[in-house]
Image: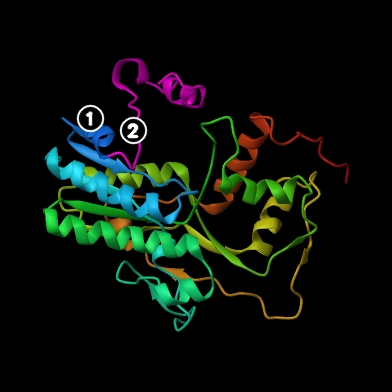
Amino acid sequence: SEDPKNEHLRELEGAKERLTLWEADLLDYNSLGRAISGCHGVFHAACPEQMLRPAVDGTKNVITAASAAKVRRVVFTSSVGAVYMDANRSTDVVMDESYWSDLEYCKDTKNWYCYGKTVAEQTAWKLAKELAVDLVAVNPVVVLGPLLQSSVNASSVHILKYLAGWVNTYANAVQGYVHVRDVARAHVLVFEAQSASGRYLCVDSVIHRGEVVDILAEMFPEYPLPTKCSDEKNPRAKPHKFNCQKLKELGLEFTPVKQCLYETVKSLQEKGHLVTLPNKQH
């Protein structure tokens, strides 16, 4: 389809020779079957705004179509949202791939994003087992770095709001970050490595929002970054701990979070979402 929102894909290196775009609807099994037929592998990448039904039924359709087409491996983009949500888990616990979010806790806290991610990934594993599909999952945190598309995505809004002066405080919360290139590389590594199996946590670091604004203020002092936390009463939220040894053993080296944030801001400036201000005279 000649949808202008796909233009950035056509401009990728080698796209003229090696990229074909197929129109498919996750809820339309036949459209997926046509796209997947003849493929060696399928990457089922996540859409952040997914609602529960497309997340679960779409996953079922992709894995069923992949099984019918006898693809070698399906790489499923899950999320750390399917890993860390559990009221009874201390932040001192170092989580690895064996940890799952607690669905009841997701429901109680109305965290439908984590609920959906968990149900979708559990569905994927159950069906892959039934159909004997070789499935590998990648579980990233919030993905930062340069934007390919011209519109702003949810992850960049998360940074943009601090720089654009939309908020005058930051939340007493922590967030995990990883560079988009590291996530892409993780998908390639788990697809190509014959030995790859199971889930792969994909996290560079988990830091407090206060640390995010400090890093941004250090690199881009010209922007009106918030200096106060919206919650001065409670102790500072502690970061979750993740062990990403599995991906590192496949050869992935993570980009440091400072560089992720720097490249995100530079990209927002280049795409015109953020006015480039002259550095304040100190």
**Does the segment drawn in magenta span residue 57?**
no
Q: What residue sits 88% from the left and 42% below the top?
A: 281
Where 14 falls versus 178 (above or below)? Answer: above
**Does the segment drawn in magenta span residue 16?**
yes
In this view of the protein, which residue sits in the foreground, 106 or 247?
106
Is 214 on the left-hand or right-hand side of 54? right
In this view of the protein, which residue sits in the foreground, 41 or 191?
41
Can you identify the residue that label 1 sits on?
Answer: 34
Which of the marked residues, 2 or 1, is nearer the chain's N terminus?
2
Can residue 251 be seen at all in this image of the molecule? no
* Visual colour scheme: rainbow
**Residue 38 in the image, given as x and y percentages of width and height:** 16, 30
Q: Mark 2 Cα within 10 Å, few/some/many (few <14, many 20+)?
A: some
Q: What residue sits 60% from the left and 48% below the top?
A: 261
Can you identify the residue that label 2 sits on?
Answer: 24
In this view of the protein, which residue sits in the foreground, 22 or 243?
22
| Mark sitting on residue 183 | none
Among the 4 quarters of the image, the one containing residue 242: bottom left
Q: What residue sits 43% from the left and 25% below the top?
A: 9
Q: What residue sits 43% from the left and 76% below the top?
A: 104
Q: Return the residue found at the far right.
A: 281
Where are the magenta residues, as a range?
1-28
Which amino acid type is marked by label 2? Ala
Which amino acid type is marked by label 1? Arg
Among the 4 quarters of the image, the one containing residue 69: top left
Can residue 4 be seen at all in this image of the molecule? yes
Q: Return the residue found at the far top.
A: 16
Dots 2, 1 in contact, CB < 8 A: yes
Q: Mark 1 Cα within 10 Å, few/some/many (few <14, many 20+)?
A: some
Secondary element at tag 1: helix
- The answer for how far apart the CA atoms under marks 2 and 1 are is 8 Å
